[in-house]
Amino acid sequence: MGRPHQPPIGLAVARVARTLTRAFEDALAAAGGSQSAWLVLLQLKINPGATQRELADALELREATMTHHLSGMERDGLITRRRDPNNRRVHQIELTDAGEQAFHRLRKAAGEFDERLRTGIAPERLAELGDTLALLAANVQHGANH
Amino acid sequence: MGRPHQPPIGLAVARVARTLTRAFEDALAAAGGSQSAWLVLLQLKINPGATQRELADALELREATMTHHLSGMERDGLITRRRDPNNRRVHQIELTDAGEQAFHRLRKAAGEFDERLRTGIAPERLAELGDTLALLAANVQHGANH
DNA sequence: TATTGTTATACTCTATAACTATA
DNA sequence: TATAGTTATAGAGTATAACAATA
């Protein structure tokens, strides 16, 4: 004890992340959306045929949590769900026109947000940030209590 | 459009932060606490005479939210609240013995967590991470919608 | 009137457990 | 039995609005 210590790095990451997340949520709300809707829509674009379980895994959520979000988005008219005729346990998820429009609006808002975020920071520095964050994540996952 | 774009930096920060936050919450839970309790206890140690408003500001929360957390901690026997005789609107918050013990347990857990996080990452790199995160936070705060 | 804090209420995100339908 | 998803329920965290007490 008594060693001189740098300030907790986890605290710094968490604090900045909170600031960023809130601002991002505001930006998406201004575009008529939310972070959860944006992440789900993006994931559906990346992996159009995904099952709900796959979506949940991609977003690191439980299936029940995914159901919750998708039900909300269905209620809001962004997506439709219908049974896969080949395997009726599976739901096929599709974007409605409103969902497509929302996706484009949110993509624009997310892009502008990121643009704002990067302002005045050298690209190499941002690249190194990404690498360092990956190292932190790896350190956490190694030591994880299973 | 069509410009080659680096992956969204906000997404990367948010994703890693979520991983970190969850692991940190687990670590604190294993020490019999929670992140909110830890942050409040730490803040009380840093600024012992703080009013609830000051605590709320320091943690970027609303007063009502602070009341909520403090009531929980009082219920759990970590703190006591009593009126300041000089200004009876203000509550003086003090750690109980159990609160002191919790603080030390959580400080230890938090320290070990941070140790794990830093493993294998050069100190200069971590320092630069902190700086870059500060730049990101500044960029967000400038552009904030007031 | 302004300040400090509480209460009542509600919303979002997340989770677990028990369930249905399907394979 | 195993898989895909839903429903019911709950808890944590946060917020706003209305309020009480105090200055």
Image (cartoon, coloured by chain):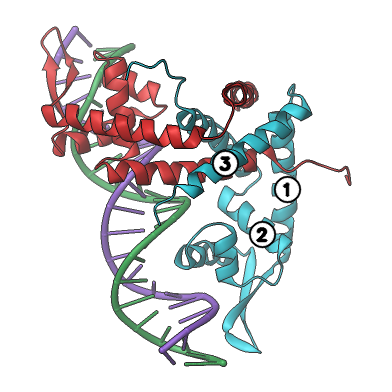
Chain colours: A cyan, B red, C green, D purple
Q: Would residue A97 be seen by someone viewing this image from the given angle?
A: yes
Mark 2 chain: A
Classify mark 1: helix, strand or loop. helix
Q: Are marks 1 and 2 on the same chain?
A: yes
Q: Which residue corresponds to mark 1?
A: A107
Name the disc covering residue B14, or none.
3
Q: Would residue B146 be seen by someone viewing this image from the given angle?
A: no
Classify mark 2: helix, strand or loop. helix
Residue located at (36% from left, 47% from top): B26
Mark 3 chain: B
Name the disc covering residue A11, or none.
none
In this rendering, which labeled residue sits more in front, label 1 or label 3?
3
> In whole angstroms, how far apart are the C-alphas of marks 2 and 3?
16 Å
Mark 1 chain: A
In this rendering, which labeled residue sits more in front, label 1 or label 2?
2
| Residues tagged 1 and 3 counted as in contact (Cβ below 8 A) | no
Mark 1 vs 2, N-terminal side: 2
